[in-house]
Amino acid sequence: MQSASSRPQAAPAINGVTLPSVQEALTQLDSKRIDGVFYDASALAWANEQQPNRFHILEPRMDTRTNTNVAMALKKGSAFTPALQQAIQSVLESPEYKECLEYWGLEESAITEAAIR
């Protein structure tokens, strides 16, 4: 039997916040007040060009069935980056992902690899 001190600690809950602009979100990301930004992929790509080496953009970018893609940005060196990449990869490899693509007729849009850019 494990003692309470030797049991793995549960991860803290993720707290989402809504900010007035992507610039405010990126400022808070850079100052380490938040751990990640979920926003329009083109805006994050532009911000990454303007502020190089400040954050990673995770791939794949998610198609929201609008005229834009959505990406994730995490602060540079974040411990969340490999975990989130693995989580996305596990979804991409799941039968449910393939079933959803088939249901919506999006098999040709299947993403097979979660990458960090």
Image (cartoon, rainbow, N blue to C red):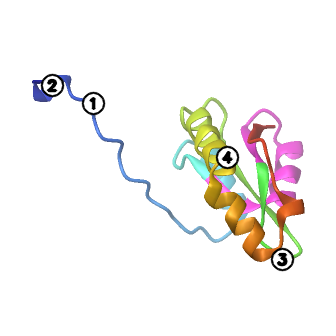
The 10 Å Cα crowd at callout 3, few under 14, some 14 to 19, many 20 or more, is: few
Residue that numbered label 4 is attached to = 93
Q: Which tag, 3 or 2, sits closer to the chain's start?
A: 2
For the N terminus, the quadrant is top left
Residue stretch in magenta: 37-59
Give the foreground label among 1 and 4: 4
Q: Based on the displayed image, in which of its 4 quarters is residue 82 positioned?
A: top right
Residue that numbered label 2 is attached to = 5
Q: Based on the displayed image, in which of its 4 quarters is residue 6 positioned?
A: top left
**Where is residue 55 drawn, in percent x and y?**
72, 39
Tell whether position 93 is magenta: no
In this rendering, is residue 114 above or below 72?
A: above
Q: CA distance from mark 2 to mark 4?
A: 35 Å
Residue that numbered label 3 is attached to = 66
Residue that numbered label 1 is attached to = 8
Q: CA distance from mark 1 to mark 3?
A: 41 Å
In this rendering, is residue 29 above or below 66?
A: above
Q: Nearer the viewer, residue 11 or 65?
A: 65
Could you tell whether 26 is left or right of 1 in the image? Answer: right
Q: Residue drawn 87% across and 45% down?
A: 50
Helix or strand or loop: what does disc 2 sit on?
Answer: helix
Give the foreground label among 3 and 4: 4
Helix or strand or loop: what does disc 4 sit on?
Answer: loop
Q: CA distance from mark 1 to mark 2?
A: 8 Å
Helix or strand or loop: what does disc 3 sit on?
Answer: loop
Q: Which tag, 3 or 4, sits closer to the chain's start?
A: 3
